Amino acid sequence: MNKKNITIAIDGPAAAGKSTVAKLVAEKLDITYIDTGAMYRAFTWYCLEKGINCENEADCDAVIKDVAIELRPGHIVLCNGIDVSKQIREPRVSSKVSYIASYKNIRLSLVEQQRAMANKTSVVMDGRDIGTYVLPDADVKIYQIASVQTRAVRRYDENMQKGIPCTYEEIENDVRTRDYIDSHRSFAPLKPAPDSVLLDTSFLSIEESVDMVLKIIEKKTGVKPNV
Ligand code: DC
């Protein structure tokens, strides 16, 4: 691939497979993957650990300054130096993270860090507001969707593989609730950027989805994997 910094935004609803696709695309292009959802999750984990009510905006705002979140290679997420990569995927975090992500001051703080990361190097960044708010000038914007049932089955299987206890019903409810909260919040809600390419992965394998994203990137930027 060429050396100009490129920015690729992948947005879409919960459990649409964005992180799986984004990770593989980043690997194939040998650029940095940034999982912005992991940042909202890490802060949610911190609030839960401290016994802070995640549904109280003022209480959460009060502690954002105490929290340093770091994304390390290998998909390691550190919160104040503690490795929380596994804990942030637990249902107790998933069920509260959309509240946290609807708070403007929390978003402003995390978005600042996300923009700083994208300024330094080429990135594939996934989230909800990357193409619309975080990186409005991204070179490529993908809006990745899949049906609620497909997403719930995928997230359930993923949790089972990781040994995270949950039921299918719990996951489907969580996906529906998060879709609603993420797309109805007032600040930077989940929605497709007007210049995004819609990718419905309901009937696509991971490999097919990755191939499609790579083709879109090549068409828009000329950048392609080395092999
Ligand atoms: O992608 P995920 O499921 O790990 O995201 C967790 C939550 O964080 C999700 O409910 C919405 C929120 N989020 C957000 O509001 N903006 C982002 N850029 C990324 C995630």
Image (cartoon, grey):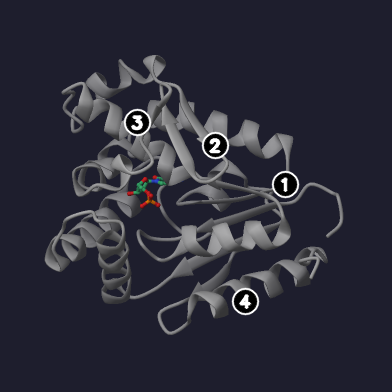
Label 3 to label 4, Cα distance in Å? 33 Å
Cβ–Cβ under 8 Å for marks 3 and 4: no
Instruction: Provide residue 62's location: percent of width, then percent of height.
Output: 30, 15
- The residue singled out by tag 1 in the image is 122
Tell me the residue at 29%/40% (across/down): 87
Label 2 to label 4, Cα distance in Å? 27 Å
First in sequence, mark 3 or 2: give its number: 3
- The residue singled out by tag 3 in the image is 43
- The residue singled out by tag 2 in the image is 72
Label 1 to label 3, Cα distance in Å? 25 Å
- The residue singled out by tag 4 in the image is 212
Q: Is residue 214 left or right of residue 1?
A: left
- SS class of the residue under badge 1? loop
Cβ–Cβ under 8 Å for marks 2 and 1: no
Label 4 to label 1, Cα distance in Å? 19 Å
Tell me the residue at 30%/56% (across/down): 162
Foreground label between 2 and 4: 2
Q: Is residue 80 left or right of residue 11?
A: left
Front position in the image: 219 or 164 = 164
In the orientation shown, which residue stands out farthest toward the bottom? 203
Residue type at mark 2: give it.
Arg
Foreground label between 3 and 2: 2
- SS class of the residue under badge 4? helix
Q: In which quarter of the image is residue 218?
A: bottom right
Residue type at mark 1: give it.
Ser
Crowding near pointer 1: few (<14 within 10 Å), some, many (20+)?
many
Crowding near pointer 3: few (<14 within 10 Å), some, many (20+)?
many
Foreground label between 2 and 1: 2
Residue type at mark 4: give it.
Met
First in sequence, mark 2 or 1: give its number: 2
Label 2 to label 1, Cα distance in Å? 16 Å
